[in-house]
Image: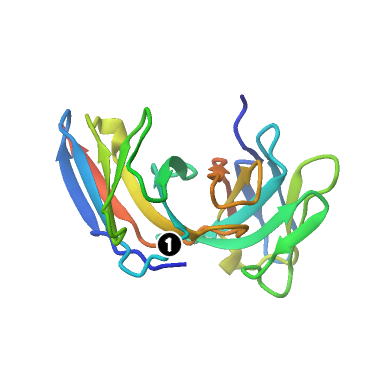
């Protein structure tokens, strides 16, 4: 699986958009980009995933660059409850079991 | 839909005892994954199971740890003769299929403390 690079921490004002970047310059054509978050002491929560196209769901939007070497997770209107560690993970296509979690980005949403 | 259920939420054991952690996957999910999170660290994959089969156990310690997912009932992660270093949060995830096109959904974990 390709390696990802994320900033260690970010701050965001409540009500503003939170844009979390992820670099995955060695990603292969059949690898998916996944985002999870972990709020203190809880299990990781699935947010969104994509292969090539931008994706949007009720939680967030995922913007993947055309060369697929980086992506951005967008929380359109961050709330205090979005404070968490956000993990960007790439997974090879096909049948593969495990997720490889890095250190993620600690997002702090401030009032 | 009920999510992934793990029990107990907290488990305290003395050194040398056995720990049994249970995971009931989401309804309709037949693939289960176990991860371990040591204090202040990220999650590390341990084992991937499908009903009655171990698919990938590359992350499991070679001794004292075992996992099963029987035809009926929850998946069990068993740690024999626990040591202090086993203190961690153990998370279970499930998915309907074992493909990477589908996300894994996690439970809230079992916090294991070894005295």
Helix or strand or loop: what does disc 1 sit on?
loop
What's the chain of the residue with tag 1?
A
The structure's colour scheme is rainbow
Compare residues B112 and A104 and report the one nearer the observer: A104
Q: Is residue B88 visible?
A: no
Compared across the picture, whether A20 is left or right of B10 comes to left
Image position of A65 with respect to B82: above or below: above
Q: Is residue B11 visible?
A: yes
Residue positioned most to the right: B71
Residue positioned most to the top: B1
Q: Residues within 10 Å of mark 1 (few under 14, many from 20)?
A: few
Quarter of the figure with residue A63:
top left
Q: Percent x, y for residue B89?
A: 54, 53
Residue in the image at 16% along x and 40% along y: A12
Q: Percent x, y for residue B101?
A: 54, 48
Compared across the picture, whether A22 is left or right of A37 comes to left
Image position of B73 with respect to A98: above or below: above
Which corner quadrant holds the C terminus of chain B?
Answer: bottom right
Which corner quadrant holds the N terminus of chain B?
Answer: top right
Quarter of the figure with residue B64:
bottom right
Residue in the image at 35% along x and 70% along y: A26
Compared across the picture, whether A103 is left or right of A70 comes to right
Image position of B60 with respect to B51: above or below: below
Image position of B82 with respect to B23: above or below: below
Compared across the picture, whether B42 is left or right of B95 comes to left
Residue in the image at 47% along x and 60% along y: A30
Name the residue that disc number 1 marks: A29
Residue in the image at 66% along x and 72% along y: B61
Q: Percent x, y for residue B84?
A: 59, 67
Q: Percent x, y for residue A68?
A: 31, 58
């Amino acid at each position: 699986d390709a390696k990802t690079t994320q900033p260690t921490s970010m701050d965001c004002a409540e009500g503003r958009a939170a844009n979390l970047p992820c670099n995955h310059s060695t990603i292969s054509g059949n690898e998916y980009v996944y985002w999870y978050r972990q709020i203190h002491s809880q299990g990781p929560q699935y947010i969104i995933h994509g292969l090539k196209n931008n994706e949007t769901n009720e939680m967030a939007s995922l913007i993947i660059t055309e060369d697929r070497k980086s992506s951005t997770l967008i929380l359109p209107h961050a709330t205090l409850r979005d404070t968490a560690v956000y993990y960007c993970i790439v997974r090879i296509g096909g049948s593969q079991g495990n997720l490889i979690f890095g250190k993620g980005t600690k997002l702090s949403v401030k009032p | 839909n009920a999510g992934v259920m793990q029990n107990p939420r907290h488990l305290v054991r003395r050194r040398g005892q056995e720990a049994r952690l249970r995971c009931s996957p989401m309804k309709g999910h037949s693939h289960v994954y176990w991860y371990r999170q040591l204090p202040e660290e990220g999650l590390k994959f341990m084992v991937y199971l499908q009903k009655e089969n171990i698919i990938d156990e590359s992350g499991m310690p070679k001794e004292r740890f075992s996992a099963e997912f029987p035809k009926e009932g929850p998946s069990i992660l068993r740690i024999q003769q626990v040591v202090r270093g086993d203190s961690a949060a153990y998370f279970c995830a499930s998915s309907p299929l074992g493909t990477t096109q589908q996300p894994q959904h996690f439970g809230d974990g079992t916090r294991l403390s070894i005295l």
